[in-house]
Image: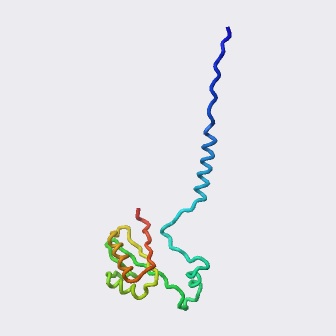
């Protein structure tokens, strides 16, 4: 009597090579992708009006003024050039040069309402170029 053995079922395809390919693709996409840094300030690109004005003489009337930095402390008061200012004084100071860029540097502990009130005050003073830089220690 002859006994016949059943044939073993063939094993499925190996997943090791597919995992290797996926890892290589993952590394490739991670290395080639760009990450946005929202805290950076835009630089003048070559050929733009801002770059041409930046290359002009500083005595020239077309040269853009340096941005104004307004610091918002933890208590919610605004400081311009190291002096604390109330909203009326801040509005008067900004009304002199509304075309300048204003950068707000809020403290990590500053109340959100103080930041909103400050931006509303600056917009009411005619400031149109406004940027807010997130503090480093904020989570």
> Residue 115 at x, y = what percent?
36, 72
Q: How is the image coloured?
A: rainbow
Q: Nearer the viewer, residue 7 or 56?
A: 7
Whether residue 73 sits left or right of residue 25 in the image: it is left
- Which part of the image, by quadrant, shows the N terminus? top right
| Rendered residue at 61%/59% (across/down) | 32
Q: Residue furthest right?
A: 2
| Rendered residue at 59%/51% (across/down) | 26
| Rendered residue at 55%/75% (across/down) | 43
Against 27, is 69 above or below? Answer: below
Can you tell which quarter of the image residue 109 is in? bottom left
> Residue 97 at x, y = what percent?
43, 87
Q: Nearer the viewer, residue 98 or 75?
A: 98
Whether residue 19 sits left or right of residue 135 in the image: it is right
Whether residue 15 sits left or right of residue 120 in the image: it is right
| Rendered residue at 62%/40% (across/down) | 16
């Amino acid at each position: 009597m002859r006994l016949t053995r059943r044939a073993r079922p063939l094993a499925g395809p190996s997943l090791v090579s597919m995992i290797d390919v996926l890892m290589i693709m993952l590394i490739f996409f991670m290395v080639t992708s760009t990450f946005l840094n929202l805290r950076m300030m835009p630089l003048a690109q070559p050929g733009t009006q801002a770059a041409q004005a930046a290359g002009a003489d500083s005595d020239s009337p077309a040269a853009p003024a340096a941005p104004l930095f307004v610091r918002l402390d933890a208590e919610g008061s605004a400081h311009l050039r190291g002096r604390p200012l109330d909203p009326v004084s801040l509005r008067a100071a900004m009304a002199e040069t509304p075309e300048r860029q204003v950068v707000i540097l809020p403290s990590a502990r500053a109340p959100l309402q103080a930041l909103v009130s400050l931006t509303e005050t600056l917009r009411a003073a005619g400031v149109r170029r406004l940027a807010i830089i997130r503090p480093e220690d904020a989570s």
